Amino acid sequence: MAVTNHLVYVKQRPNGMPALDDFGSKEVTISEVPDQYVLVKVDTLSVDAFIRTTLDDAGLHTMSDLGAPVTALGVGEVMESQFPGLQSGDWVCGPLMAQTHALMPGAAFQKIEPSANIPPSTYLGILGLTTGITAWAGMVRVGEVQADDVVVVSGAAGAVGTVAGQLAKARGARVIGIAGGAEKCNFLTRELGLDAAIDYKGEDIVSRLNTLAPDGVNVFFDNVGGEILDHVLDNLAMGARVVICGAISQYQDLHDVRGPKLYLRLAERNASMRGFTVDYYAPDFPAANEELSRLMTEGKIKLPEHVVNGVDQFPQALLTLFNGGHRGKLVVKP
């Protein structure tokens, strides 16, 4: 079958933070499906911070070629398959890229089983590799969160932060979220049930941390980096664990990332700081899926979606991710 694929591509390398002019869009015709390939109609695309690191050669992830579709994970339905493991009508999750249709090797995808209670986009959110599974690996395996720990999560109203905070709370910790603006802070405490929230835009983080965590922070799950990381380092408890999941405040210039000034607090407090990427914890994915699925069913973890419609809006959605204009999971519906 012949289909028209509408895609968003990398037009030029960003100078600092991405701008709309760094991207372009075009239509291409897909006329046949080669052996071992599948044709997938994209249902939902995940907008993730790691995408910034694919736009040039400074990050961990493979750099996207100029003219190639923007890297993005997604879920979709198989339209045609020449791959033995998949057939028409199957749902898959994987690197679908910023486009309406994906023609890719079938081995690149994981078959999923959406249902009335588990819509396809759940596999990008609570059960998503870059969201819920990442939060679980960082909080459980790296942070080793325990009941009665005092936990602080930065970027707490974002997708990973939202799940990380609720997961720590479900495991018996006292959780403080850091987010930008009173609305997001109210969301964290009133809708998600976190114990407290700090508005970094309108409150003094240091004084609020001293008030909310007078005996120090046991686990800090950091998505932001920069000054916020230093503020929390200055308030660590003895034996604290600092988890470096991301540093969205530093992604505007990956060639000049600024590290913490107060790292000696780690030695003074017999604390540790560990960074991670979720792929190192692949053997733990079944355990993560089991716990997250159970907590979701029990209503102890929820993740609202911020939906942007139209694949052409993918670049704008990416900018929204970095300027903090969303809460929960940011997705694009092509």
Image (cartoon, rainbow, N blue to C red):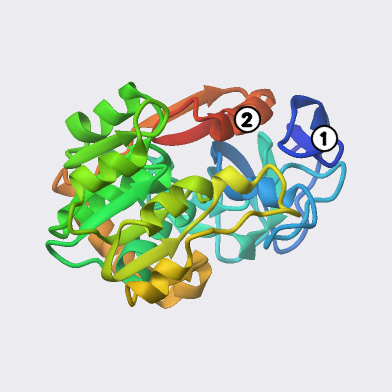
Q: Residue at x 44, y 28 (%)?
A: 306
Q: Nearer the viewer, residue 244 or 92?
A: 244
- Judging from the image, what secondary structure is the residue with disc 2 in? helix
Residue 319, numbered circle: 2
117 up-or-down from 185: above or below: below
280 up-or-down from 317: above or below: below
Residue 260, numbered circle: none
The quadrant of the picture occupied by the C terminus is top right
189 up-or-down from 235: above or below: above
* Residue 160 point in image, percent of width and height: 41, 48
Q: Amino acid at mark 2?
A: Leu
The quadrant of the picture occupied by the N terminus is top right
Side (left or right) of 153 relative to 95: left
Side (left or right) of 312 relative to 225: right
Label 1, label 2: how far apart the Cα atoms are: 28 Å
Can you identify the residue that label 1 sits on?
29
Q: Nearer the viewer, residue 293 or 146?
A: 146
* Residue 185 point in image, percent of width and height: 29, 30
